Image (cartoon, rainbow, N blue to C red):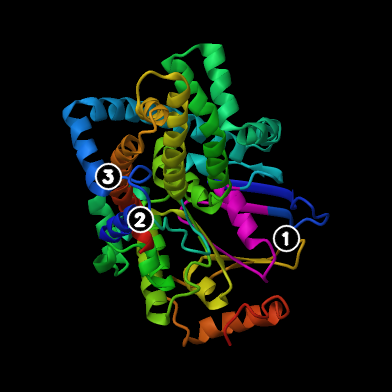
Amino acid sequence: MIHLRLKQKGFRGSSTPVLRDVQLNLMPGSFTAIVGPSGAGKTTLLRIVAGLDHEYDGDLDCDAQFLRTAFLFQDARLMPWLTAARNVALACEGDRGRATAALHSVGLAEVADSFPNQLSGGMQRRVAMARALVHEPQLLLLDEPFASLDEPAVREMHALLRSYCQQHQPIVVLVSHNLDEALALSDKLLFLGESPSTIIHTFTVPFSDDLDFASETVLHTRQRLLDKLPKLLEGVIDT
Amino acid sequence: MAGFFVIWQLCVALFSPDLLPSPQQVFVRITEQWQADELQRHLLVTLRRVFISFSIAMIVGLILGMVMGSSNKVDVALDGPLTVFLNVPALVVIILSFLWFGLTERAVVIAVLLNKVPNMTVIFREGVRAINSDLLEVGRVYGLSLSRRLLSIYLPQLYPYFLAATRTGLALVWKIVLVVELLGCSDGLGFKLGVFFQYFDIEGVLAYSFAFVVVILCIEGLILRPWERSVMRWRI
């Protein structure tokens, strides 16, 4: 379990903090989505949980270094000099077999020997996804991981993520600009306000994983959120 | 290459043969020197000096460059001496090395190092400054071991700089080694060139220079190019 008590987080050269008074309790098997406007410090929060940012006021109970962690960054961050397969293999002690299987699971087995600059942006993100899952993380941090993917690929990635979560029960934190994606994947939504931001609303998703957006209850819940947080959700949903 | 020999031959026709011997004469001289076991002996001595001083310069330059590139404090502290050594004339360093360390192999290596290390340091410092820290973060998050991070993430970002340092390094090192040999050695190409100079033997100068150029081209074609192709494959 991870417990973060963040009193304040600012950046050097800026007098106003980005985040203040944020508390997070993350249990194994939980899937938390962080939703909020641009510049609210969502990525910063994720980096603090990952142990990549130590310059803040507060404390983190279980640092990510004690957990096997995978981070899907906003950009794919593949090593340009390694082939897709070797990029994935970095996260599984160089095991070529497992890397190839992981690439197969994201539908990219045929580009195993291609270099990242020979792949499209969407393909690179899928390679990054394969690299994250092959690591078998106990803590999985996702920073808008599906932003540049087309609809079928997004559905495929969602399915893959769900099946991983069911099997391994990791702690997952997702940062998303997309309310429907957050509703579909997570079991808890945290809404961050404008900077300096804090959690202004916590919402527990009342339905199961296979969300049907045509169903009455789902639409009703979605509408309730939209009514409650109109200003905040501007630009966060696809209408 | 053929064009080069044609131009050479044309120039021979224009100048007196005393000033510019023909390619055939130079080739005959190379063969003679080779058969007399002279050419390869001096060539090997020079190559050994080039190789030893180049390798040490590369290692020292890499370490200094890495330290200066990653620490601001060290960079500020060493930047002054670095600029001084970059600009001290090679000849001064060579003469001082011989005066301090005698006409020894050690003096040769030290003279080359003092000339070459600052250059390599600058190249590697720039390389380290250009390292993409986002990629290093990936290594940290995924808990890669230090050696894995170094080999798979850190050093590959420095390969273009390794190549640049090797190319300019070899070119500069062998020029300096020749001057060092001319001034204070009793063997090596530089020494031989000095002897030919005293006898006004242009044919000899050209024969030895030509042999050395061939060796350098072989190093470029057989080692550097294939190495570049393999580490830069992803850029294609």
Tell me the distance, in whole angstroms, between the alpha carbons under discs 1 and 3: 65 Å
For the N terminus of chain B, the image quarter is bottom left
Q: Secondary structure at mark 1?
A: loop
Percent coordinates x, y for residue A176 in the rendering: 56, 69
Q: Which residue is mark 1?
A: A198
Disc 2 is attached to a residue of which chain?
A: B
> Which three-letter amino acid code belongs to the residue tagged 2?
Cys
Name the residue: 28% across, 43% down: B214
Where A161 sits versus B188, above or below?
A: below
Q: Nearer the viewer, residue A113 or B70?
A: B70
How many tags in the picture? 3
Name the residue: 48% across, 67% down: A145
Q: Quadrant of the rendered structure where residue B211 is?
A: top left
Name the residue: 44% across, 44% down: B162
Q: Which residue is mark 2?
A: B11
Q: Secondary structure at mark 3?
A: helix
Nearest-to-viewer mark from 2 and 1: 2
Disc 1 is attached to a residue of which chain?
A: A
Q: Using residue B189 as the reference point, say whether residue A121 is left or right of it.
A: right
Q: Is residue A32 magenta?
A: yes
Q: Where are the magenta residues, as a range?
A: A23-52
Tell me the distance, in whole angstroms, between the alpha carbons under discs 2 and 3: 27 Å
